Image (cartoon, grey):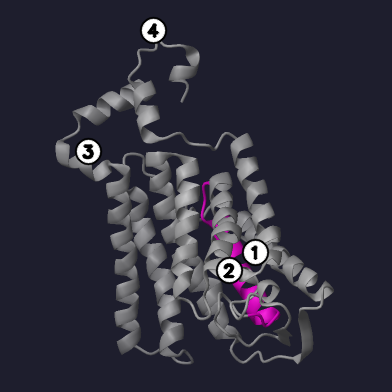
Amino acid sequence: MEQGRAIGFEEKPLWRRIADFPLVVMVIAACFWFGAILVAALIARSVLFPGLTPEMTFNLLGALLLIIFYKLVIRRLGERPRDDLRFVGAVRPLFAGLGLGFLIFSAAVAVAAAIGIYRISGEGDSSDLLAALLGPALFVAVSEEMLFRAILFRWIEEFGGSWAALVVTAGLFGAVHLNNPNASLLGAVGIAFEAGVLLGGAYMLTRSLWLPIGIHAAWNFTQGEIFDIPVSGTRVHGLLQARLSGAPLLTGNGFGLEASPIAMIVATATGVWLVVLAVKRGELIRPWWVRRGEANVSPAVAPESAVRP
């Protein structure tokens, strides 16, 4: 089967071979991702929906358009089209992700409270709950997971293999958070390990966006809108009124617990567990050139391990 696919690849026109090359497909898919964001921004500037601010309108439209663009175009790209956002069977992994994201950050907060750096001082403010649901819990989770997992991870993995995809996307995910308020190198490294490995592992394990979207949304919502902890440096108003105080290394120094060794250990350990499960399930993908080389070896003369898909 692999040999037949390789021969078919060679018979394609040059332009199609170029367009189907994993890194080229990745760039094309990213352009559609940015296109959806741009269209949502333009609509949000000129159309207001009752009860929604322009920012809330953008978040809602952005998430919706990203899903539409993905379903209509992005999932059909490449040599091996695949839908990572299947609606059938989505409920279970989505809710599993929501539960896991809540538990991970609740565990980090519990440790912070136990050592005295997290203290609750009273009730918070729930007036911004809808904005938080549309922003950090919906748009951020959908947009970032689609870009970093369904586009970057997917086609870097198809080219360079699973380990390259995990390392590169985790590093990029941490690096983009350097633009956040109160950002630091430690915070970026923390995001790379705790979130990059965790969300990358969730995607590797399920080959679906629903589990990482659920984890991402619950992670942001739990730390910000429940425990009143800055979300990647952005100050929020949670259901509780609380504060972090103590050694900057432990509190995240204004960035939040994501820049603390507490969250790094709890979340990274969970991410490593997901990656191990993915490897045990046989979800580890070898680099493109290794697969191509094996596919070109004649099954008649090649050892069994060389022609195994």
* Foreground of the two, 306 or 172: 172
Q: Is residue 99 visible?
A: yes
Give the residue type at disc 2.
Ala
Determine the CA span between mark 1 and mark 2: 7 Å
- Neighbours of disc 2 within 10 Å: few (<14), some (14-19), many (20+): many
**Residue tagged 1:** 98
Determine the CA span between mark 2 and mark 3: 37 Å
Work out which residue is located at the far left of the displayed protein and give it. Answer: 14
- Neighbours of disc 3 within 10 Å: few (<14), some (14-19), many (20+): some
Give the residue type at disc 3.
Arg
Q: Which mark is residue 17?
A: 3
Image point 69% across, 80% down: which residue?
A: 226
Q: Which mark is residue 300?
A: 4
**Residue tagged 2:** 217
Instruction: Indicate yes or no whether the magenta region holds residue 211.
Output: yes
* Foreground of the two, 43 or 253: 253
Determine the CA span between mark 3 and mark 1: 39 Å
Q: If you read the primary sequence from the N terminus, does the residue marked by circle 1 or circle 2 appear first?
A: 1
- Neighbours of disc 4 within 10 Å: few (<14), some (14-19), many (20+): few
Seen in the image, is 13 located left or right of residue 149?
left
Determine the CA span between mark 3 and mark 4: 27 Å
Q: If you read the primary sequence from the N terminus, does the residue marked by circle 4 or circle 1 appear first?
A: 1
Considering the numbered disc 1 on the image, is that residue within a helix, a strand or a loop? helix
Q: If you read the primary sequence from the N terminus, does the residue marked by circle 4 or circle 2 appear first?
A: 2
Q: If you read the primary sequence from the N terminus, does the residue marked by circle 3 or circle 1 appear first?
A: 3
